[in-house]
Image (cartoon, coloured by chain):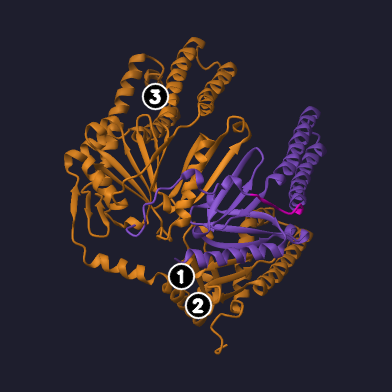
């Protein structure tokens, strides 16, 4: 072994691995069937039943033991130095052969659960960019092997990205400030008042529904004692005035809650641009601090609504690529930016680029049909319920439905009109939103893949749905004409000819 | 950015991903789909028989049977249709994967965005001696591709070929 390079020859886990696999599998099996066990015990079993149960248990244990041994036998890993790859083969019934190129390894780390602690072995986890489930882990290695493997992998991965790491480390040491943006009390108040209250409203509603239910059951429990009083508690449907009052109260409370939430989340927000990163600090209860490097930014959203636009407030959401967390978790929200800050952030994150062309695409009208259908479905359901249960007078129902349909259709129409996909030389942008206007951007060369979908019923109209995959999430654009295809070719060309690191 | 020459690009003259010829997958995969559907059918039929045994109402049983029949006829027919749509293609710088009958989807993954590649086989695959190749990217599960029904040696070759492309293409 000493002459050849370490791990060059396919090898297995340490023998203790069999025990580990056995115990883990047994544990999983028992976890799956514990209900049966409880049922069995509660039944106070008789003679033959006990016998069969024990027999079954014994057979299972033996089968699992055989399985564990085979799993151990088939679990082979090695490092292919010529191909610069780590290779793992595993599986008994279904087998898998995984190859991880050195330069795709993000990090290598140890993991130990209780079982592994007991039998004194280690798990080495090889993490690649991508979701959690894609990571490769080698369980049950002895301490020396785990150390050796992780040091080799860290070294070979380091050879590929060493330049990167050093430049990254040096930047945090000397970082002269370029500009700073702080949110004052008044701006926070403005943000609070102008964000939509739906979340706040939902919170309030949830609170009051539980309260109402609790009180109701409380009063019903004591209904006999408090009979007289209980009868005077007004039924909610008693009067329009009561409804109106309730509505205003709810609105006020949800505004209050929303403002409070904004204060808690964003109090003391301070955005500083240094030479290499954007540093963000905020929060009343928990102080969040993040540094955003342009290279890590995968997807950026700018959100505003008419009221906020008046106040010159915009919210930026940034999705970062991250190796440790699953996608989407790493989303940073920065509210309360004015037009000037927006320009500064943009030019810092993406550079000042002039585009030679700009091509816009709109979705086809066919999409509206689908959207209108979505509006109609609740109407149909509520009509059926009305037919069966007659929960309100038909005229009332009709009035509500007409208002709802008109509003819904108008909303969907506006939404449809607002949808745009814009190709420029370096960026792809999607615009949407009726009230909350959202602008989603990503740098073309950071795209990971494209999926083009065509349902049968799009064929005649030559339409497709396009989904752009980035490491910070997907961007989808539906029902667009096939004239978009050359631009998709352009995106692929940009990605494939790019030599820049995307994260 | 600085050393990138800003030549104008004629977008219409770029290679078109819609014009590639797809390699079909092994017809054994249709057998696999049908086996899977049949296993499911057997389970459902066992359930139906249980209800029959416990004397559920005849109307319900007939209705269930009709539903089962319609659903599984659709499934078998769909297996057949979908099988024809499976295809993959390799270009100089990317891999394309096509699937789906009702909703036909094509995913294009550039080689320099592939994270890793694996070959896997489950029990039915082994029985029929086919393999499938998975290509993982950092773009989440939507952009990962899984090409089923490949002859095992081809699958290994494809995996190794892709891995080679990664190290020559992706390192820079």
Rendered hue of chain B is: purple
- Rendered hue of chain A is orange
Q: Are marks 1 and 2 on the same chain?
A: yes
Report whether B2 appears left or right of A114.
Answer: left
For the residue pair B85 and A266, the one nearer the viewer reads as B85
| Residue A51 image-quadrant placement | bottom right
- Residue A108: numbered disc: 1
Chain of the residue on which disc 2 is drawn = A
Which chain is indicated by disc 3?
A
Q: Which residue is mark 3?
A: A226
Alpha-carbon span between mark 1 and mark 3? 67 Å
Q: Which numbered disc, 3 or 2, marks the residue that appears first in the sequence?
A: 2
Q: Which residues are drawn in magenta?
A: B21-28
Residue projecting furthest to the bottom: A3
Q: Nearer the viewer, residue A311 or A20?
A: A311
Assign a secondary structure to mark 1.
strand
In terms of depth relative to the viewer, which is nearer, A461 or B151? A461
Rendering quarter of residue A227 = top left
Q: Are marks 1 and 2 in contact (CB under 8 Å)?
A: yes
Q: Residue furthest top?
A: A395
Left or right side of B91 for A166:
left
How far is mark 1 from mark 2, CA to CA? 9 Å
| Quarter in which the N terminus of chain A is drawn | bottom right
- Circle on res. A149: 2
Q: Are marks 3 and 2 on the same chain?
A: yes
Pinpoint the chain carrying mark 1: A
Residue B26 belongs to magenta span: yes
Quarter of the image with the C terminus of chain A in it: bottom left
* Rendered position, A91 above or below A400: below
* Mark nearer the N terminus (1 vs 3): 1
């Amino acid at each position: 072994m000493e002459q050849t390079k370490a791990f060059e020859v396919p090898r297995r886990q340490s023998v203790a691995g069999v025990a580990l696999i056995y115990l883990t599998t047994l544990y999983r099996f028992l976890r799956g069937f514990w209900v049966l066990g409880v049922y069995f015990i509660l039944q106070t079993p008789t003679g033959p039943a006990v016998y069969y149960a024990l027999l079954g248990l014994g057979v299972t244990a033996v089968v699992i033991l055989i399985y564990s041994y085979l799993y151990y036998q088939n679990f082979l890993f090695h490092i292919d130095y010529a191909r610069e790859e780590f290779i793992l083969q595993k599986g008994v019934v279904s087998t898998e052969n995984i190859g991880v190129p050195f330069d795709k390894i993000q990090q290598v780390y140890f993991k130990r659960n209780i079982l592994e602690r007991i039998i004194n072995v280690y798990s080495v986890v090889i993490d690649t960019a991508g979701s959690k489930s894609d990571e490769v882990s080698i369980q049950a290695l002895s301490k020396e092997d785990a150390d050796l493997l992780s040091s080799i992998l860290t070294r070979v991965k380091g050879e590929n990205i060493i330049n990167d790491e050093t430049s990254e480390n040096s930047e945090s040491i000397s970082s002269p400030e370029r500009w700073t943006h702080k949110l004052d009390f008044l701006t926070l108040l403005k943000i609070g008042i102008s964000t939509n209250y739906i979340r706040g409203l939902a919170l309030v509603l949830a609170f009051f529904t539980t309260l109402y239910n609790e009180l109701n059951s409380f009063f019903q429990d004591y209904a006999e004692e408090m009979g007289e009083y209980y009868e005077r508690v007004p039924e909610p449907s008693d009067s329009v005035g009561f409804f109106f009052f309730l509505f205003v109260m709810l609105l006020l409370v949800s505004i209050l809650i929303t403002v409070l939430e904004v204060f808690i989340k964003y109090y003391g927000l301070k955005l500083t641009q240094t030479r290499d990163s954007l540093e963000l600090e905020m929060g009343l209860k928990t102080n969040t601090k993040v540094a955003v490097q342009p290279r890590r930014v995968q997807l950026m959203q700018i959100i505003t609504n008419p009221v906020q636009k008046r106040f010159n407030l915009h919210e930026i959401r940034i999705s970062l690529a991250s190796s440790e967390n699953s996608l989407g978790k790493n989303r940073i929200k920065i509210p309360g930016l004015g037009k000037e800050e927006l320009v500064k952030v943009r030019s810092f994150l993406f550079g000042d680029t002039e585009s030679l062309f700009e091509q816009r695409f709109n979705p086809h009208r066919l999409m509206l049909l689908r959207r209108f259908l979505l509006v109609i479905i609740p109407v149909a359901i509520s009509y059926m319920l009305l037919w069966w249960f007659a929960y309100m007078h038909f005229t009332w129902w009709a009035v509500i439905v007409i208002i709802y349909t008109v509003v819904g259709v108008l909303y969907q129409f506006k939404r449809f009109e607002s949808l745009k996909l814009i190709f420029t030389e370096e960026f792809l942008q999607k615009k949407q939103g009726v009230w909350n206007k959202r602008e989603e951007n990503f740098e073309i060369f950071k795209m990971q893949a494209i999926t083009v979908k065509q349902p049968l019923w799009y064929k005649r109209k030559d339409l497709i749905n396009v989904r752009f995959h980035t490491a910070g999430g997907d961007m989808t654009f539906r029902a667009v004409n096939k004239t978009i295809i050359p631009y998709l070719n352009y995106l692929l060309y940009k990605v494939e000819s790019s030599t820049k690191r995307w994260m | 950015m600085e050393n990138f020459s800003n030549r104008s690009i004629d977008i219409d003259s770029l290679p078109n991903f819609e014009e590639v010829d797809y390699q079909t997958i092994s017809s054994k995969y249709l057998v696999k789909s049908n086996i899977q559907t049949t296993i499911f059918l057997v389970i459902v039929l066992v359930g139906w028989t249980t209800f029959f045994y416990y004397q559920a109402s005849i109307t319900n049983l007939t209705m269930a049977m009709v539903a089962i029949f319609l659903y599984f006829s659709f499934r078998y027919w769909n297996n057949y249709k979908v099988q024809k749509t499976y295809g993959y293609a390799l270009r100089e710088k990317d891999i394309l994967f096509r699937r789906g009958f009702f909703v036909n989807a094509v995913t294009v993954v550039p080689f320099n965005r592939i994270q890793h590649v694996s070959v896997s086989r489950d029990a039915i695959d082994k029985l029929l001696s086919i393999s499938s190749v998975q290509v993982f990217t950092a773009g989440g599960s939507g952009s990962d591709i899984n090409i089923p029904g490949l002859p095992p040696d081809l699958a290994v070759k494809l995996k190794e070929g892709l891995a080679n492309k990664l190290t020559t293409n992706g390192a820079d």
